Image: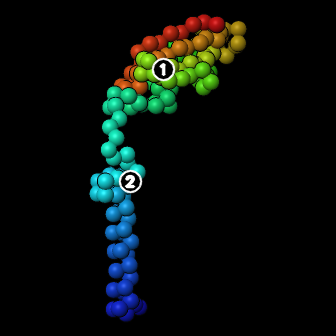
Amino acid sequence: MLSVTEAATALAAAGTIVATGVAATLYFSGEGGGGLLSGAGSSPDPGRYAYEMSDAVFSCRDQVVKSIPYKVRNMNIDSHSSRYDEEQNSNVVFIDLEVIERPGSFYSKYSYSAKVMCSVSAASNEVTSFKVRRS
């Protein structure tokens, strides 16, 4: 069993650790000490870069599923061609598909490949352009 002095020392040490953690969190987030790492003083454009490429990929995958339901066998993101278009403030995602002409069939003669070009707004993460081309 701990003596009163040991218990008081342990309680003071725990309180110091918690207080230090809270102070560091407030300092680095910009709430308390000006925010050393939060970029205080800089004002980024609020309409740009709100969503990243990974968010755009999910939006395009959802659009593919809505547009071609039950017919997509394979879906591969072309990460080498997908890019951010600064002029349009949008992410352009390219997807390679294998589409089944006869759902329920696993024969390759009933499938074809297709290419998707999908443009997603970086400000709102909404699909602004969606094109499917059989290749």
Is 54 displayed left or right of 18 in the figure?
right
- Point out the image quarter for the C terminus: top right
The crowd level at tag 1 (other Cα within 10 Å; few <14, some 14-19, many 20+) is some
Q: Residue at x 34, y 58 (%)?
A: 27
Query: Which of the two residues, 83 or 127, is positioned nearer the viewer here?
Result: 83
Q: How many marks?
A: 2
Answer yes or no: is residue 8 visible.
yes
At which x and y percent is residue 26? 32, 57
Query: Which of the two residues, 42 or 73, is positioned nearer the viewer here?
Result: 42
At which x and y percent is residue 72? 57, 17
Callout 1 secondary element: strand
Q: Earlier in the sequence, mark 2 or mark 1?
A: 2
Query: Which of the two residues, 21 or 61, is positioned nearer the viewer here?
Result: 21
- The residue identified by callout 1 is 85
Q: Residue at x 56, y 22 (%)?
A: 82
Residue found at the far left of this picture:
32
Q: Amino acid at mark 1?
A: Asp
- Point out the image quarter for the N terminus: bottom left
At which x and y percent is residue 80? 62, 24
Q: Amino acid at mark 2?
A: Leu
Cα gap from disc 2 to disc 1, whole angstroms = 31 Å
Answer yes or no: is residue 120 visible.
no
Q: Hey, which quadrant is residue 8 in on the image?
A: bottom left
Callout 2 secondary element: loop
At which x and y percent is residue 49? 41, 30
Res 63 label: none
* Residue 8 vertical placement versus 73 (above, below): below
| Colour setting | rainbow
- The residue identified by callout 2 is 36
